[in-house]
């Protein structure tokens, strides 16, 4: 077994206002025990408007959750109307920032170059990037999944030191599995996560590849979390739809009970 501590991350996407956020985090805290989080790190990624609220409840109630964000700009301040900087997130004790989610890439046109700038800016502010990669169904059917994912990783990690990569998180999320209810089979997910690790080894060395945590994302649910998490190269899950309710997200965090 690897020494990598699993990381289960809840990507709330554009859901829940700050009142609803408070309710969800409190419900989750009743559901999840200290023992659960001894075995698994848990990060919550609310919308920006909820982050201060979630930070306050985590810190005042000493809840065992790490704070995350879904996105940021790559500059720390300036004339960038509508954007939020990594420095602002770091000031709120955000620990993890999702970068290059397929929705950001496909809907908002984020390129690999922009993703790389963000990875470096997040690291420069002492936060951990969760770098997302993944192929479309057309790319998979054309036999191009491995090349697409390797390209995203090599570009996203350009200029990042091996030590920094070792402490990072990479999320493999096949786009055809996101929000569709169609999870990749555990074998396919494992094969692609092993490919991600091999790509990191080539680009950044074996030590970084051995240490980097690789999440699977795409329709993770309580019913499939244990099988996915039992795969040797899957070190966590990036959960969308199923993280919006304390019961389902709690049961994913407690996937070991179902093993
Ligand atoms: P999903 O989303 O769990 O709803 O498929 C995953 C993600 O986009 O991170």
Image: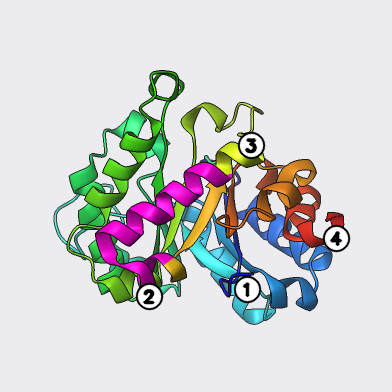
Dot 3 and dot 4 residues touching (CB under 8 Å)? no
Q: Is residue 41 left or right of residue 227?
A: left
Against 13, residue 98 (above or below) is below
Give the residue displayed 64% in from the left and 55% down from the top: 21
Sooner in the amino-acid sequence: mark 4 or mark 2:
2
Say whether residue 245 is visible: no
Q: Secondary structure at mark 2?
A: helix
Q: Which residue matches tag 2?
A: 91
Residue nearest the observer in this picture, 165 or 194: 194
Q: Secondary structure at mark 4?
A: helix
* Image quadrant assignment for residue 24: bottom right
Would you say the residues marked 3 and 1 are in contact, meaning their CB atoms lie under 8 Å apart? no
Q: Is residue 252 above or below residue 77?
A: above
Specify which label sits upstream in the sequence, 3 or 4.
3
First in sequence: mark 3 vs mark 1: 1
Residue 164 belongs to magenta span: no
Q: Main secondary structure of the magenta part?
A: helix
**Mark 1 nearby-residue class (10 Å; few <14, some 14–19, many ≥20):** some
Q: Is residue 196 magenta?
A: yes
On the image, numbered disc 3 is attached to which residue? 219
Picture coordinates of residue 200 (x, y %)? 34, 58
- The magenta span reads 190-209
Does the rendering let one see residue 129? yes
Give the residue at x 64% y 27%.
182
The label number, if any, that marks residue 257 in the structure image: 4
Mark 3 CB within 8 Å of ligand 1 = yes
Labels 3 and 2: the sequence-earlier one: 2
Query: Circle 1 sits on which residue?
Result: 58
State the separation of the CA atoms marked 3 and 1: 26 Å
Q: CA distance from mark 3 to mark 4?
A: 20 Å
**Which of these two is toward me, 133 or 63?**
133
Choose mark 3 or mark 2, whichever is in front: 3
């Amino acid at each position: 077994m690897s020494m990598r501590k699993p990381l289960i991350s809840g990507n709330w996407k554009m859901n829940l206002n700050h009142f609803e956020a408070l309710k969800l985090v409190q419900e989750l805290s009743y559901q999840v025990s200290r023992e659960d989080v001894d075995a698994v790190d848990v990060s919550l990624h609310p919308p920006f408007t909820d982050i201060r609220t979630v930070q306050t409840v985590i810190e005042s109630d000493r809840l065992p959750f790490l704070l995350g964000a879904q996105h940021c700009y790559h500059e720390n301040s300036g004339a960038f109307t509508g954007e939020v900087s990594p420095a602002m997130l770091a000031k709120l004790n955000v620990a993890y920032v999702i970068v290059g989610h397929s929705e950001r890439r496909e809907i908002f046109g984020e390129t690999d170059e922009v993703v790389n700038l963000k990875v470096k800016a997040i690291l420069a502010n002492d936060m951990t990037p969760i770098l997302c990669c993944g192929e479309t169904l057309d790319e998979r059917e054309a036999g191009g999944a491995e090349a697409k994912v390797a390209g995203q990783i090599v570009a996203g990690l350009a200029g990042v030191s091996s030590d920094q990569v070792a402490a990072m998180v990479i999320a493999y999320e096949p786009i055809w599995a996101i929000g569709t209810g169609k999870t990749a089979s555990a074998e396919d997910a494992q094969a692609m996560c092993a490919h991600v690790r091999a790509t990191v080894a080539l680009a950044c060395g074996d030590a970084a590849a051995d240490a980097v945590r690789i999440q699977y994302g795409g329709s993770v649910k309580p019913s499939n979390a244990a099988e996915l998490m039992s795969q040797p190269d899957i070190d966590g899950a990036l959960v969308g739809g199923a993280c919006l309710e304390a019961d389902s997200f709690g049961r994913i965090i407690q996937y070991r009970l179902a093993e």
